Amino acid sequence: DWSSDVCSSDLQACAKYISLLDAYSPLKTMQRGYSITTCQNTLVRSIDGVSKDMILYTQVGDGTIESKVIDKRRMKDAK
């Protein structure tokens, strides 16, 4: 009957979206080797956001690393 076809189609679409959300989740990204670093509860996007002796927190797939800025070096091709 047509109602079971509609429900089946809706379930397939829902499963597709769930799979996409799962693939792009931040936790899945970190499990692939990426990390998120913060300093004073602010996302670190550049070396300009930190200075010597600041404490950084880096979240990886299985936990958090606390570190201290010793030095920073700009990449030669960075703007």
Image (cartoon, rainbow, N blue to C red):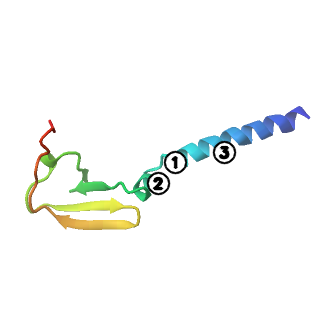
Three-letter amino acid code of the residue under disc 3? Ala
In the shown orientation, is residue 20 left or right of residue 59?
right
Q: Which residue is mark 2?
A: 28
In the shown orientation, is residue 6 left or right of residue 75?
right
**In this orientation, which residue lies closer to the viewer: 28 or 41?**
28
Three-letter amino acid code of the residue under disc 1? Ala
Dot placed on the residue nearer the N-terminal end, 1 or 2: 1
Residue at image coords 21%, 61%: 56
Which of the 4 image quadrants contains residue 75? top left
Q: Rounded to the nearest whole Å, what is the CA distance between mark 1 and mark 3?
A: 12 Å
Residue 65 at what x, y percent from top left?
A: 28, 67
* Mark 3 burial class by Cα count in 10 Å: few <14, some 14-19, many 20+: few
Say if mark 1 contacts mark 3, CB within 8 Å: no
Q: Which residue is mark 3?
A: 15
* Mark 2 burial class by Cα count in 10 Å: few <14, some 14-19, many 20+: some
Provide the secondary structure element on which disc 2 rests: helix
Say if mark 3 contacts mark 2, CB within 8 Å: no
Q: Rounded to the nearest whole Å, what is the CA distance between mark 3 and mark 2?
A: 17 Å
Provide the secondary structure element on which disc 1 rests: helix
Q: Which residue is mark 1?
A: 23
Residue at image coords 33%, 60%: 59
